[in-house]
Image (cartoon, rainbow, N blue to C red):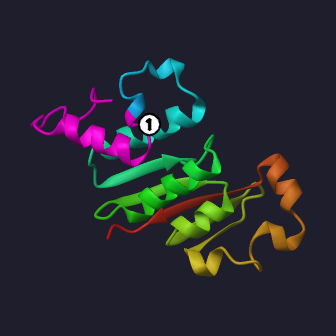
Amino acid sequence: MLTARYVFRDEVGAEATARRWLASLDCEALADRDVRRLSRGERQRVGIATALAQETPLVLLDEPTAHQDPRHQALVISELTALSGRAQVASLHDLNAAARFATHALMLWGDGRSLGGPAEEVLTPAVLPISSGRRSRASRRGEAFFHVHTHAA
């Protein structure tokens, strides 16, 4: 987890920061385990902890709640929502996570249509595929996905 941290900066506190993020994402007990032996959900949380430990001003996340049980989905979203001082961009298919996490959303459809703006204007029943009867089609073929970002606080 520390291999990419502070490549050109001071290493003081790097391990403590990494362990703090592991603990906050319920991964502290995984710190000494071989990543190849972790479940997909555990790997996902360790990967997120690794990204957050870099302390970059921008965090890019691809499906941060994927492979998580409901408790860990809520934990990941809670930690990301509480994160301040960094811009976050996440690709999400989980509408519930997007609604809890996003300040802004960009919806993209396979036919080239898109809609973006504040999450409360984009993630509405009138706009979402669920309300237009396309939910199963969109879910099965992946015709809609949600690109979500939050502003740095």
Front one among 78 and 102: 78
Q: Is residue 39 above or below residue 98?
A: above
**Does 116 sit left or right of 151 as displayed?**
right
Front one among 127 and 11: 11
Quadrant of the rendering where the C terminus is positioned: bottom left
Front one among 106 and 100: 100
Q: Is residue 122 above or below residue 83?
A: below
Residue picked out by circle 1: 47
Q: Residues within 10 Å of mark 1 (few under 14, many from 20)?
A: some
Magenta residue check for 25: yes
Quick one: which residue is furthest to the front in this view? 29
What amino acid is labelled 1 in the image? Gly
Magenta residue check for 130: no
- Residue that appears at 19% across and 37% down: 14
Q: Quadrant of residue 74?
A: bottom right
Number of numbered discs present?
1
Provide the secondary structure element on which disc 1 rests: helix
Q: Quadrant of residue 137?
A: bottom right
- Where is residue 41 shown, x and y percent of the image? 57, 37
- Residue that appears at 63% across and 45% down: 69
**Does 90 sit left or right of 99 as displayed?**
left
The answer to whether any part of residue 138 appears in the image is: yes
- Residue that appears at 48% across and 63% down: 149
Q: Which residues are magenta?
A: 1-28
